[in-house]
Amino acid sequence: MPDDPLACSAEQIERSLQAIAPFYDLDFAPIEDDLELWRQLAGGFGRARILELGAGTGRLAAPLAADGHDVTAIDASPIMLQHGTEKMRQAGVRIIQADMRAPHAMPDNLTHFDLIICALGTFQHLLTRHDQLATLRNAAQRLKPDGCLALDLTAPRPEDFEPGPQPLRLEWTREHPCLGTVAKLAGQELAEPRCAEHPLDRAAPIAWITYIYESAAQRAIARFPLRVAITPGELDGLLRQAGLQPDHWYGSWTLDPLGHGDRTIALSSPAARQ
Ligand SMILES: C[S@@+](CC[C@H](N)C(=O)[O-])C[C@H]1O[C@@H](n2cnc3c(N)ncnc32)[C@H](O)[C@@H]1O
């Protein structure tokens, strides 16, 4: 894999996701506070028409559809969708393999959503301003005039700006139904973007993230780039440039004020057209 994160290809990312996908639900299904937030937001629309960008294995899409909402899940990764297909189909989720940056790759009828969600730092997989704006504009076009785009990012942490590799740490040890005891190790190292087109992208903190899932039978290693730190100011500018109006900001899934938690959550509506 290249050292320059901006030179990382979709095929290389997919190879990392192949390592992660079998362990994704073991890793992230125990998170429940964010599901409560999405349930609350969706409930505000009655039976909501929801689009999830980067839905992965359907951790959120499936329970929201099971609640009775009309849910469409898009994800660029065949392997992530494959691991969630059965769960999402059973719940009635419409599944589409598509890149959230590419409006033409998505069916024309994917419009008029009450709620579009991009959860659990998925927006941070977009490394450049070009990709961030393409995704936000794509979402803005697909919202009802009174609809809401909800972005949930990891809040910037001091270690996101530290140069050099940070030591691998043991995140958890859990029981997998087939593989027995599994341990997850995680680490990150600040990357140096070189082939950036936009000057701000060269200065953006992008890190190589390493996940290792180990069981007695196998060791799966994934290494992928992530925009580890996006400040609320930067996000505010991006949203406005994409034709969205940020209405509410929160710092946690339990709706603490911005700056009082480990999340950056922005709820935006389409800016009134002139
Ligand atoms: C951290 S996972 C989140 C999955 C799910 N939203 C959740 O909360 O459990 C990020 C997902 O975003 C997807 N993704 C990343 N870039 C994407 C893109 N450009 N278009 C569509 N999906 C993308 C990945 O394939 C992955 O499944």
Image (cartoon, grey):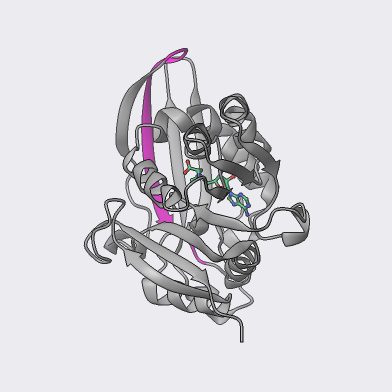
The correct choice, above or below, for 90 with respect to 262 in the image is above
Can residue 185 be seen here? The reply is yes
Residue 269 position in % (x across, y down): 50, 69
Q: Nearer the viewer, residue 79 or 255?
A: 255
Residue at image position (35%, 62%) is: 264
Residue 166 position in % (x across, y down): 33, 51
Q: Is 191 within the magenta?
A: yes
> For residue 210, what is the image quadrant?
top left
Provide the residue span drawn in magenta: 177-192
> For residue 114, what is the image quadrant?
bottom right
> Is 44 positioned to the left or the right of 88 in the image?
left
The correct choice, above or below, for 155 with respect to 180 in the image is below
Residue at image position (56%, 43%) is: 55
Q: Nearer the viewer, residue 264 or 110?
A: 110
Q: Which residue sits furthest bottom?
A: 274
Q: Nearer the viewer, residue 24 or 160?
A: 24
The correct choice, above or below, for 56 with respect to 259 in the image is above
Residue 70 position in % (x across, y down): 58, 42
Residue at image position (77%, 56%) is: 108
Residue at image position (48%, 28%) is: 23
Can residue 4 be seen here? The reply is no
Residue 177 position in % (x across, y down): 43, 13
Q: Nearer the viewer, residue 138 or 36?
A: 36
Q: Is 185 within the magenta?
A: yes
